[in-house]
Image: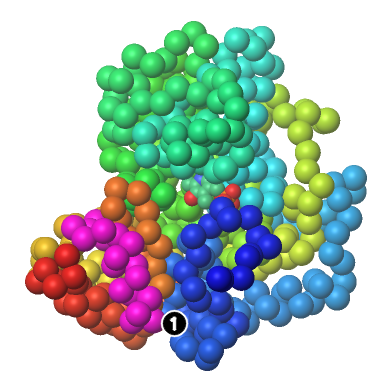
Amino acid sequence: MTEQSPLFDTYARAPIAFDHGEGSWLVDTRGERYLDFGGGIAVSALGHAHPHLVETLREQAGKLWHTSNLYQVPGQEKLARRLVEATFADKVFFTNSGAEAMECAIKTARRYHFANGHPERFRIITFQGAFHGRTLATIAAGGQPKYIEGFGPKVEGFDQVPFDDLDALKAAITDETAAIVIEPVQGEGGIRPVPIRFLRDLRALCDEKGLLLVFDEIQCGMGRTGKLFAYEWAGVEPDIMAVAKAIGGGFPMGACLATEEAAKGMVPGVHGTTYGGNPLAMAVGNAVLDVMLEDGFLEAVRDKALRFKQGLASIVDRYPDVLEEIRGEGLMLGLKCVVPNTTLVKELYANHMLTVPAGDNVVRILPPLTATDEEIAIALEDIEKAAESLSGGDRA
Ligand SMILES: *Cc1c(COP(=O)(O)O)cnc(C)c1O
């Protein structure tokens, strides 16, 4: 009999435990090295134990951990100012996670219409394949039955339409609609970039109907696609945006960004958090931006991504019985599989490479943005080897 775990049984974990990491590599408790091209689900954007992040956290840890939002937190002012300067936004609210950033985005959108004298406008339209988090409101927003079932009445006010379907979207808008929420590149849904034309249509539609456009860039933001935020590729700005994952480089944090107009209902007392924006998180968040905003950093991400994608496309061409398609933007890549995606993920474990499964039978490849060309070459070899051993029906 295997020993009973004292943990909730909510995760189907791989039988690997890591001891430490350096750059793109993780070392497990037996001393085996793994190439980490999953990044703890797009979080470790600067790799593991980045010297600037480690030094920053160490220094802050010796000074001050926590004060709460009863007082001013200079690190929040600084990080918010830098995010505002780099984006569409005028205002920032810091959280501990992505789901909380989305909760803030949803509350901000509803309060905007409340402040305008339209409390009846609270409904939010989302898209099939979406993922917005695991709180009660964000599972309702994501709309996936397997996450909603058994958790009581679904939070009211979320309407879902098919991906990239403008007619269905238009038909779903009513006098009660407050906002449209979308990931510019769906992550959990299977690395599905929203067509630029569709994002432009969304902006025009929101302007026409007085709706707020909310982007969930929790996974696709913070340099992942080769721009600081994915919306920059489309030249379409949201009114509100949720950010998390890579913003802390592995330190738990998130942020909700908004224009001054969109944030006008978020007045003193209506929202809050004990930990959100605490000095440790703010120190690390600022350190992450120090690196990402360096001259040439994002350009290097785009260059590496292009070469990586070409290499992957060539593997897809040569193993059509294993792989169907390469999709994604920048270093947010997805291999649509013919074999079950979890089979490929396991085969890659055996080759000591880490990736992440996603919806639509896709394997996500989310390397650190700091990955070197040599590491990308190793990844291509690992993936080729895995495709080769799964090819030819010998494992079908
Ligand atoms: C991960 C993710 C979330 C939820 O973030 P948590 O930090 O797990 O709460 C929300 N939206 C998207 C697009 C994500 O990828």
Q: Position of residue 101 (x, y in %)?
A: 62, 43
Q: Which residues are magenta?
A: 335-352
| Of 4 and 21, the residue lying toward us | 4
- Mark 1 neighbour density, 10 Å: few (under 14) some (14–19) many (20 or more): many
Left or right: 334, with 77 as reference point: left
The image shows residue 185, relative to residue 30, as above or below, that is above
User: Which percent across, then down, holds residue 202?
Assistant: 38, 28
What amino acid type should be assigned to the residue bearing mark 1? Tyr
Q: In the rendered image, which quarter contains the C terminus?
A: bottom left
Q: Whole-percent x and y of residue 265?
A: 70, 24
The colour scheme used here is rainbow
Is 64 on the left-hand or right-hand side of 203? right
Pinpoint residue 283: horizontal percent, then vertical percent. 73, 65
Q: What residue did someone put label 1 on? A: 34
Q: Is residue 31 magenta?
A: no
In this view, the residue farthest toward the bottom is 31
**Element on which disc 1 rests:** strand
Indicate yes or no whether the magenta region holds residue 339. yes
Residue at point 55%, 25% (across, down): 154
Q: Is residue 329 above or below residue 308?
A: above
The residue that appears at 72% across and 74% down in the rendered structure is 56
Is residue 97 placed above or below 12 in the rendered structure?
A: above
